[in-house]
Amino acid sequence: MNSFPVSEQDKDEFLNYLDQNGILDKLTDVLIMLHSEQEQPTDPIEYVRRNMYVDNPDIEEIIDLKAQIENAAVELADLQRTRDELRAQLEQYQHESQVDGEGYEEEPAKVSDNGDYFE
């Protein structure tokens, strides 16, 4: 830890700032929680960091957004699987139609990576 000269007035002002904004109380509460743990955590800094935000009003929104992201990922995987199955079916039908229509020279429909048809 770097040490550099700090005046007593600066220390007092800073402590007053921490006290007025509830930081000292919150730190004290978290340190008491840490001390009260039956089993001391292996990473006390992570414990303090995680418990500093227990009363964070955004926590519920963050949890909701994480659930939405997980659901969207599952839905995306399902849609990609369906797309791949449909592509395989399309290729099979195109191949069958080429075999059935020997001599008939129509090019099979082309599909881009995003699923759009093009000429």
Image (tube, rainbow, N blue to C red):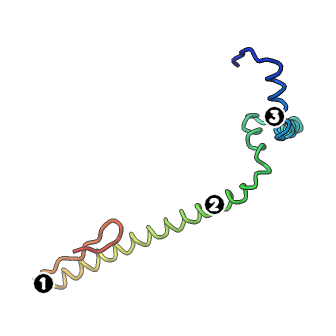
Q: Which residue is mark 2?
A: 65
Left or right: where 107 falls relative to 48: left
Q: CA distance from mark 2 to mark 1?
A: 54 Å
Quick one: quadrant of the N terminus?
top right
**Residue 51 location, x and y as percent?**
78, 44
Tell which circle, 3 or 2, labels the residue nearer the N-terminal end. 3
**Residue 74 location, x and y as percent?**
54, 65
**Residue 82 location, x and y as percent?**
43, 72
Instruction: Give the structural element (helix, strand or loop) at label 1.
Output: loop
Q: Which residue is mark 1?
A: 104
Residue type beneath disc 2: Leu
Position of residue 78 relative to residue 61, above or below, is below
Nearest the eye: 14 or 98: 14
Residue type beneath disc 3: Tyr
Position of residue 52 relative to residue 67, above or below, is above
As drawn, the residue found furthest toward the left would be 103
Q: Quadrant of residue 115?
A: bottom left
Quick one: quadrant of the C terminus?
bottom left
Q: Which residue is mark 3?
A: 17
Left or right: where 49 falls relative to 80: right
